[in-house]
Image (spheres, rainbow, N blue to C red):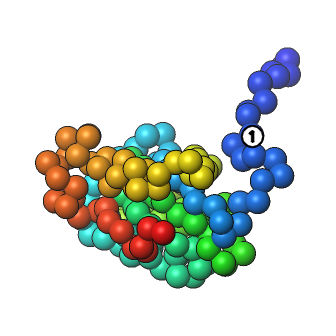
């Protein structure tokens, strides 16, 4: 059988970048595996929101804004002074969500292996990024106002 040479996947993280620096704020997106809509049941979603808060406390990251959409999660987060990298934070959150999903009858991996990150640059307005995240359910037609959506909100004050 002939060996297949697949193209190398582009690295998802910047080489040499400090992903645990307290001065950085990240817009993070964690997607469900294969685009499945995992976040569609109220009780499960409430537990996932609790997980976000617990993981935030466990690793000492700020989570300014969060939003669960049916097939992904958006976060605006910073390592603050924890010394724990964004990758460690997201890995822990993904693991906790996976374990919760197993309790709901899912099996195997439910989250994509990696996550998308965007470093919020100094010239970007964090409030505009937060607005984008919090209004995601409105733009997707799930609610008329973000306040009506029970799976998004603010955990830490935006600096």
Residue displayed at 62% across by 73% down = 80
Q: Position of residue 64 (x, y in %)?
A: 44, 67
- In the rendered structure, the answer to whether residue 142 lies left or right of residue 125 reads left
Q: Position of residue 154 (x, y in %)?
A: 36, 68
Q: Position of residue 75 (x, y in %)?
A: 46, 58
Residue carrying label 1: 11
Compared with residue 49, is residue 126 higher up or lower down, i.e. above or below?
above
Compared with residue 43, is residue 114 higher up or lower down, i.e. above or below?
above
Crowding at dot 1, Cα within 10 Å, few <14 / some 14-19 / many 20+, comes out as few
Q: Count the marks: how many? A: 1
Q: Position of residue 133 (x, y in %)?
A: 38, 52
Would residue 39 be visible to someone looking at this image? no
Compared with residue 14, is residue 76 higher up or lower down, i.e. above or below?
below
Q: Nearer the viewer, residue 56 or 128?
A: 128
Residue displayed at 26% across by 69% down = 43
- In the rendered structure, the answer to whether residue 129 lies left or right of residue 17 reads left
Residue 35 location, quadrant: top left
Residue displayed at 69% across by 72% down = 84
Residue 109 location, quadrant: bottom right
- In the rendered structure, the answer to whether residue 87 lies left or right of residue 129 reads right
Q: Nearer the viewer, residue 56 or 72?
A: 56
Would residue 114 be visible to someone looking at this image? yes
Q: Nearer the viewer, residue 23 or 99?
A: 23
Residue farthest along the front direction in this orientation? 123
What SS does tag 1 mark?
loop
Q: Quadrant of the N terminus?
A: top right
């Amino acid at each position: 059988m002939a060996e297949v040479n697949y193209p190398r996947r582009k690295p998802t993280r910047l080489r040499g970048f400090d992903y645990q620096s307290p001065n950085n704020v990240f817009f993070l997106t964690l997607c469900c595996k294969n685009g499945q809509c995992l976040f569609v049941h109220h009780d499960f979603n409430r537990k996932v929101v609790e997980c976000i808060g617990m993981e935030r406390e466990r690793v000492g990251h700020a989570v300014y804004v969060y939003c669960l959409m049916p097939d992904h999660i958006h976060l605006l987060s910073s390592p603050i002074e924890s010394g724990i990298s964004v990758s460690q934070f997201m890995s822990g959150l993904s693991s906790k969500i996976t374990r919760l999903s197993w309790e709901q009858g899912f099996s195997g991996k439910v989250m994509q292996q990696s996550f998308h990150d965007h470093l919020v640059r100094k010239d970007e307005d964090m409030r505009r990024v937060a607005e984008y995240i919090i209004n995601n359910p409105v733009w997707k037609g799930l609610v008329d106002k973000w306040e009506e959506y029970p799976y998004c909100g603010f955990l830490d004050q935006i600096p």
